[in-house]
């Protein structure tokens, strides 16, 4: 399992400690971890991060603020877009609005005990084909709905709804009056 994350909270350190105690083989990349815990950092090294994701069976995602409606780290999208690995992400309020379906595009976990059980289930050799199918479906959804291209088109649609056209640009005064 791969976890690309900085250790910026006691909760995150406790998560990794519990996973290690449970015998989970964990590739950990990030800053701020106790000496010897992490194998390096992938911060802004997107090529290395992508290679690691593609080589993993499972990528772990957590959320520091799971009750903040719709907040998700960019690592969720990076993990899905890279493909190859099943994303197991901590539940966060509003994930469904991103088009994500538990068991179809990723696996959602609630707490550390739930995560450990789901890891045992999904990492079994009998679930390898299903794990790869969910990873492929997550990648396809991400590339279709959450790429930069899709996001720019979404923003352009919003601007068109507001009456903006490509030959119309707002003056600085118009920008501030719109706010």
Image (cartoon, rainbow, N blue to C red):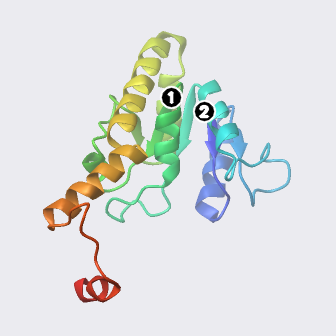
Q: How many marks?
A: 2
Query: On the rendered structure, is 101 left or right of 44?
Result: left
Q: Residue at x 79, y 47 (%)?
A: 37
Q: Is residue 33 above or below residue 121?
A: below
> CB under 8 Å between callouts 2 and 1?
yes
Label drawn at residue 71: none
Q: Nearer the viewer, residue 52 or 59?
A: 52
In the rendered image, which residue does mark 1 sit on?
83
Q: Choose the circle earlier in sequence order: 2 or 1.
A: 2
Picture coordinates of residue 62, whole percent (x, y): 51, 51
Residue furthest to the right: 35
Q: Secondary structure at mark 2?
A: helix
Label drawn at residue 53: 2
User: How far, Cα to Cα, is label 2 from label 1?
Assistant: 7 Å
Picture coordinates of residue 125, whole percent (x, y): 54, 12
Q: Residue at x 27, y 52 (%)?
A: 154
Mark 1 neighbour density, 10 Å: few (under 14) some (14–19) many (20 or more): many
Mark 2 neighbour density, 10 Å: few (under 14) some (14–19) many (20 or more): many
Q: Is residue 163 above or below residue 143?
A: below
Q: Residue at x 38, y 44 (%)?
A: 149
Q: Secondary structure at mark 1?
A: loop
Query: On the rendered structure, is 32 left or right of 173?
Result: right
């Amino acid at each position: 399992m791969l976890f690309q994350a900085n250790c910026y909270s006691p909760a995150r350190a406790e998560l990794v400690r519990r996973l290690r105690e449970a015998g989970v083989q964990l590739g950990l990349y990030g800053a701020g971890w106790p000496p010897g815990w992490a194998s390096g950092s992938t911060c802004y090294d997107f090529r290395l991060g992508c290679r690691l994701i593609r080589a993993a069976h499972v990528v772990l995602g957590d959320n520091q603020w799971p009750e903040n409606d719709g907040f998700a780290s960019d690592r969720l999208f990076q993990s899905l877009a890279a493909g190859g690995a099943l994303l197991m992400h901590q539940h966060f309020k509003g994930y469904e609005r991103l088009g994500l379906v538990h068991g179809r595009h990723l696996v959602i976990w609630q707490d550390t005990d739930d995560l450990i059980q789901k890891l045992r289930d999904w990492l079994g050799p009998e679930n390898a084909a299903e794990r790869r199918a969910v990873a492929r479906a997550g990648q396809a959804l991400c590339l279709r709905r959450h790429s930069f291209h899709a996001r720019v088109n979404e923003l352009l649609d919003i601007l068109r709804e507001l009456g903006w056209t490509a030959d119309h640009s707002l003056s600085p005064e118009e920008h501030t009056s719109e706010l």
